[in-house]
Image (cartoon, rainbow, N blue to C red):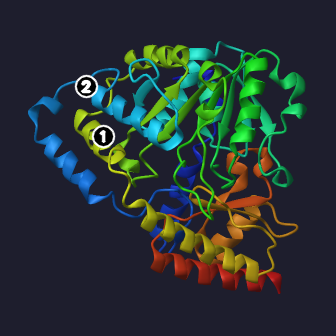
Amino acid sequence: MRTAKRIAAIPPYLFAEIDRKVAERKAAGIDVISFGVGDPDLPTPGFIVEELAKAAHDPSTHRYPSYYGLPAFRRAIADFYRRRFGVELDPDTQVLPLLGSKEGIAHLPWAFVDPGDRVLVTEPGYPVYEVGAILAGGQPVHIPLRAEEGWFPAFERVGAAADGAKLLWLCYPSNPTGAVATLDQLQEAVRFAAEGDLLLAYDNAYSEITYDGFVAPSVLQAPGAMEVAVEFGSLSKIFNMTGWRIGWVVGSPVAIEALGRVKTNIDSGVFNAVQRAGVAALESGMPHLPELLATYRRRRDRIMEVFWEAGWKVDAPKGALYVWLPTPPGESSVQFTARLLDQAGVVVAPGTGYGPSGEGYIRLSLTIGDERLEEGCERVRKALVGGRA
């Protein structure tokens, strides 16, 4: 039996590998604390769960959903963008519900990328940007990001790499770096996309997860963005709904129609009861958010405290659910990750899982209960002191 050649170009999914390592250690009787996957440990707000239960008891939700999503959910997304970003969207032509934003991110290249077409993948970044390009037959072209430039692309250096490209991926607040982007920076990205006849695909899944007074913009706030950009959003991280698999893409009507054509041929939409719960979430005003952010900020500060005391001279991230840190001098990402696992029983994600520019970094997630986080921090502290000595 022969698999498709495209499969050979796809590495094992980073987080599946992390799960495998954790399972191996646990099977050996080792207590492992994982800072690996960004899966919120806090529960979905109760009012959303109650709406799901109510909707699930309605037999009308048990049938196939609309391929294009419930009109009420599309309107709720459009209303959220109006309130939050001042962006006007047509719910019928500029909004498309997704089975989680990951699904739409993976499928967007199918609608725009022909075999051999270039896809500009900023890295370190979410691995699915590159994998989606490969599955569509495209050629991922890495756009390296640098710490000294705030992990934002220097478009003047992209040069010939953009020739013939179809897509450009950006994500802020960033997974994995926690970097944020201003509206001025996003306007620069929109101009670059327009000049290069690119579709700018903007991953804004962490739009509400920011700290220290920063408020994340939407790329659609930038002049001209509606002609060249789409933005992916999700209920997963904002409302602790990762397992519910519901998100959206908004923006260019041309791009929305094209991705919708792909999706109508490969899936049957989001469970209507989940969409009705999504309406309740988006219309709620997010009363849970201040406490959620306070929890993540406290966890961020605790992790940073450990590394600061051990001599790391880096700033705390202003967004997302992660702490992105350099490895000690002379240690690669994989080596440092292995040392923390061996010496502390702590799992972190190696930066190389997010692209070549992730070498020399690790990522720690904030989505771990306070008690286990504290124990993990203490273990890491001892490992760092021992390593430094």
**Element type at mark 2:** loop
Residue 225: image quadrant is top right
Q: Is residue 154 above or below residue 293?
A: above
Figure quadrant of the C terminus = bottom right
**Element type at mark 1:** helix
The crowding category of the residue bearing disc 2, from other C-alpha atoms within 10 Å (few below 14, some 14 to 19, many at least 20), is: some
Residues at circles 2 and 1 in contact by the CB criterion of under 8 Å: no
Q: Is residue 50 left or right of residue 196?
A: left
Task: Please name the residue that numbered disc 1 is placed on.
Answer: 279
**Kind of residue at disc 1:** Val
Q: Position of residue 27 (x, y in %)?
A: 45, 68
**Kind of residue at disc 2:** Pro
Residue drawn at (39%, 24%), measured in percent from left and top? 91
Residue drawn at (17%, 48%), measured in percent from left and top? 53
Q: Is residue 64 above or below residue 55?
A: above
Q: CA distance from mark 2 to mark 1?
A: 15 Å
Q: Earlier in the sequence, mark 2 or mark 1?
A: 2
Task: Please name the residue that numbered disc 2 is placed on.
Answer: 65
Taking depth in this image into account, of 311 and 319 the one nearest to the observer is 319
Q: Is residue 164 left or right of residue 229?
A: right
Residue 318 in view here:
yes
Residue 159: image quadrant is top right
Q: Position of residue 155 (x, y in %)?
A: 84, 33
Residue drawn at (52%, 67%), measured in percent from left and top? 296
